[in-house]
Image: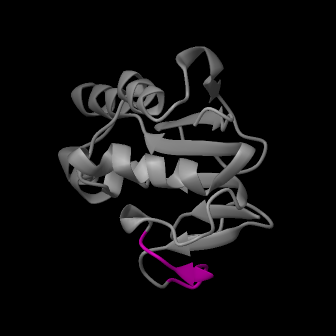
């Protein structure tokens, strides 16, 4: 099984899960409170902006829940807004404060270093994290970071 956690369909053939009903959502579940799938039953998870809408002290717990749902060898893709990119855009005048407040409001702001740290804490060593500059599967925004990790027997 392949799922995407997103308010809109971005990945062909994936079940779309989000905490609110939208036209693209197949199943309304708030992944911040845990996925209700059988442990080890999901092959691929694409998490679009999930960590950004999660309270900072709950990010590790949410990630552990995603990892638990993955089968061994399953892939977890984290797609998040790069706060460093966004700050540079605001400071450089490419993004107004109004645009920032409208499009980039988050519970948790993450950059590449922070995503690496939290993924290491849930069992994805940095040497096994794969960063994507572009995605052949979905459209990537310039302000987004994409990282993938594979679940091992040790997680």
On the image, the x and y values in percent for residue 53 come to 32, 57
Q: By what rule are the colours in the image chosen?
A: one colour
On the image, the x and y values in percent for residue 83 come to 33, 34
Question: Which range is magenta?
Answer: 22-30
On the image, the x and y values in percent for residue 106 come to 27, 52
Q: Residue 74 colored magenta?
A: no
Residue 140 showing in the rendered view: no
Q: Residue 25 colored magenta?
A: yes
Foreground pick, 56 / 37: 37
Quadrant of residue 121 in the image? top left
Q: Residue at x 45, y 47 (%)?
A: 63
Task: Give the main secondary structure of the magenta stretch.
Answer: loop
Q: Residue furthest top?
A: 127
Quadrant of residue 110 in the image? top left
Q: Residue at x 57, y 81 (%)?
A: 27
On the image, the x and y values in percent for residue 68 come to 56, 52
Q: Which quarter of the rendered picture does the C terminus lie within? A: top right
Q: Is residue 71 above or below residue 128?
A: below
Q: Which quarter of the rendered picture does the N terminus lie within? A: bottom right
Q: Residue at x 68, y 35 (%)?
A: 153
Foreground pick, 13 / 95: 13
Q: How many marks?
A: 0
Foreground pick, 9 / 61: 61
Residue 113 showing in the rendered view: yes
Q: Residue at x 38, y 21 (%)?
A: 113
Q: Is residue 61 above or below residue 117?
A: below
Q: Residue furthest front?
A: 154
Does 109 sit left or right of 72 as displayed? left
């Amino acid at each position: 099984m392949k799922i995407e956690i997103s308010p809109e369909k971005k990945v062909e053939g994936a079940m779309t899960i989000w905490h609110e009903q939208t036209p693209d959502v197949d199943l309304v579940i708030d992944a911040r409170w845990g996925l209700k799938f059988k442990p080890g039953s999901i092959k691929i998870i694409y998490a679009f902006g999930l960590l950004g809408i999660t309270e900072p002290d709950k990010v590790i717990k949410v990630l552990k829940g995603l990892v638990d749902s993955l089968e061994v060898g399953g892939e977890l893709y984290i797609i998040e807004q790069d706060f460093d990119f966004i700050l540079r855009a605001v400071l450089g005048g490419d993004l107004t404060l109004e645009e920032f407040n409208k499009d980039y409001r988050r519970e948790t702001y993450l950059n590449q270093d922070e995503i690496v740290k939290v993924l290491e804490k849930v069992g994805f060593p940095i040497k096994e994290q794969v960063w994507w500059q572009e995605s052949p599967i979905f459209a990537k925004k310039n302000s987004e970071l994409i990282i993938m990790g594979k679940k091992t027997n040790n997680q």
